Amino acid sequence: MTAARPSGPGGSGTGLPRAFKIDSERRLLIDAFARVATSLGYAETTPARVAQRAGLSESVFYEHFDSLEDCFLAAFDEAVEQASAAALEAAARESDRERRIEAGFTAFMEFASAEPTLARLLIVDSLSAGPRVLERRSEALEQFAQHLDRHRLNLDDGIGPLASRVLVGGIYAVIYARLLRGESDTLPDLVPGLRYFWQLPFEGDRGDGANGGGAP
């Protein structure tokens, strides 16, 4: 997909407002970055390759981003926003605590399955990026854990916050392995097992057999 180049200082050559053109170019670059990084790896991703994939010039890339890492951060934030919105909207439709947790997990896994490029950006490629991206990744993991904390029954049990963070780290590790194997379509199958392991630290093993989901 290519973007029309501007015909003058204030326009896009199509009569569209400049703000629309800028937003369109930025989104093209973010999408192109995610696709190039997924196919080539972050080490082989360059502003020139991203711009070429977006159908834009490298100079246009630098009109929007100071560096490749800036572009990564923008793409990462976009992916986090989309994944969070899907999970929170699904959870909000449920009134029961356990159903909210399950709905949120399901929506997150369905998002990762439907958008493997963005999922790889969040979980795989972010590990090989610079310190700013790693910091943003840590912040996203902490936000995920804090969201789980809000649904716990006993907020003063001492072990709960640690368990939430261990669970989140484990979820990311399992998703990481499946994405590397090209098995993003199997991610929703993990939900029953995740639900079981979420309940276990706080409610004990109730013997309900909800420990499915298969191997990582």
Image (cartoon, grey):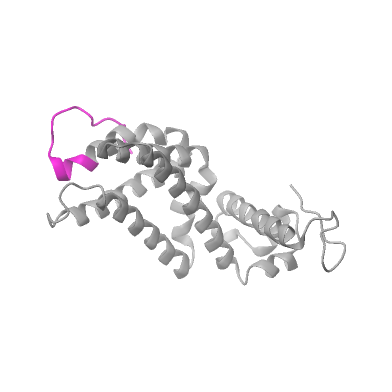
Q: Is residue 124 visible?
A: no
Closer to the camera in the image, 47 or 95: 95
Q: Above or below — where is 84 with respect to 214?
A: below
Q: Above or below — where is 15 with respect to 191?
A: below
- x, y percentage for residue 45? 61, 59
- x, y percentage for residue 15? 84, 55
* Residue at image coords 81%, 54%: 4
Quarter assignment of residue 28? bottom right
* Residue at image coords 52%, 48%: 118
Residue furthest top in the image = 209
Closer to the camera in the image, 209 or 46: 209
* Direction from residue 177 to residue 117 in the image, left or right: right
Is the stretch drawn in magenta largely helix, strand or loop? loop
* Direction from residue 78 to residue 19 in the image, left or right: right
* Residue at image coords 34%, 36%: 94
Closer to the camera in the image, 205 or 14: 14
- x, y percentage for residue 68? 59, 66
Q: How many marks?
A: 0
* Residue at image coords 77%, 53%: 3
Q: Is residue 161 visible?
A: yes
> Magenta stretch: residue 162 in it?
no
Residue furthest bottom in the image = 66
Quarter of the image with the C terminus is top left
* Direction from residue 161 to residue 77 in the image, left or right: right
- x, y percentage for residue 173? 35, 48
> Magenta stretch: residue 214 in it?
yes
What range of the chain is rendered magenta? 198-216
